[in-house]
Amino acid sequence: MPSKTAIVTGGAAGIGLAIVKYLARTREHEVAHIALLDVNPTAGEEALDSLKNEYPNVIFSFHTCDVTSWEKQAEVFGSIYAKQGHIDLVCANAGIPETGFLFQTTGDRPVKPDLKTYDIDLTGAMYTVSLAAYYISKNKSSATSPYKGSIVCTASNAGFYPLSLAPIYTIAKHGVVGMVRGLAGRFQHEHIQINAIAPCIVETKIGASVKGLPGIVYTPLSAVTRAVGMLLSDSKLNGTIAEISEENITFPEFPAYIDESTKNNLDILGNLAQRIWTGNFSHGGDK
């Protein structure tokens, strides 16, 4: 019987709403309650009404939330946990396209960059992941999975390639990819699964900014949600980025080490991290 609680940030529209609908209709993931977090209360309430009619067997809730505020996210996560008693799946999805410019070369003086895109797309995602890990770690181990819960982040293929049209967005999405890969080892130790989706241009509000450009090819939302399902269904995937273009879903490999000394150094640091996590290291040396 479905019993899991899921949270989706940016859940009132676009990729977030598509993920919400996917979780609601896919019984394999055993989701009974889905909380939508979004900064737009009008879109949130409209989505909530539609979802309740379309999926009467799932409980939905909407929470107005600015993901750039740690305090607000913490308040919402805390209230959901207090009511449900557990949080099992979190999708750190909230994001916006490029706003403003990273630098300007005209005018009498330099202008402070508008970092709203960075704050939402990366800082907000880090806050979400931090809160998700805190609450998921409270869950009991499952007899059917090595994980206590799962986190899926929304990156972009701009997290792999240079998108010169939107450098701040590119910085943020590279950061999301780095966050997922950088946390995977520690989260594996904590029995938390973390992965990310990295779609090409999807026909959402973000993708609409380039609509009409000759030759632009869109990736369907159905491919994006299919990738989410693949990440959630395979316990071997952790620290994995699912790159999605049109109907194609691939899992890019880590870049090869440039030489043996690089591999050696990172192996040493990785082993040190393992000793710290397991309590076998102190500043005075090994225990």
Image (spheres, rainbow, N blue to C red):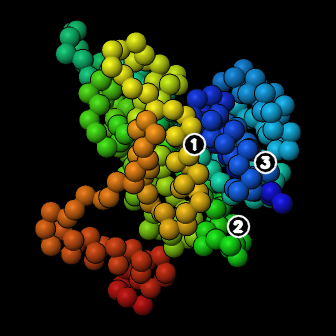
Tell me the kind of residue under disc 2. Answer: Asn
The answer to whether residue 13 is left or right of residue 248 is right
- Across and down, in percent, residue 78 comes to 73, 50
> Tag 2: Cα neighbours inside 10 Å, few (<14), some, or many (≥20)?
some
- Across and down, in percent, residue 212 comes to 40, 12
Single out the mark in the foreground, 3 or 1. 1
Q: Quadrant of the C terminus?
A: bottom left
Residue that badge 1 annotates: 225
Residue 84 position by quadrant: bottom right
Residue that badge 3 annotates: 33
- Across and down, in percent, residue 226 comes to 56, 46
Q: Is residue 114 visible?
A: no
Sequence order check, earlier mark of 2 and 3:
3
Tell me the kind of residue under disc 1. Answer: Thr
The answer to whether residue 208 is left or right of residue 158 is right
Whole-Å distance between the Cαs marked 2 and 1? Answer: 25 Å
Q: Is residue 260 visible?
A: yes
Residue 251 position by quadrant: bottom left
Q: Which mark identifies residue 139?
A: 2
The answer to whether residue 216 is left or right of residue 17 is left
Which residue appears at 55% of the width and 63% of the height? 234
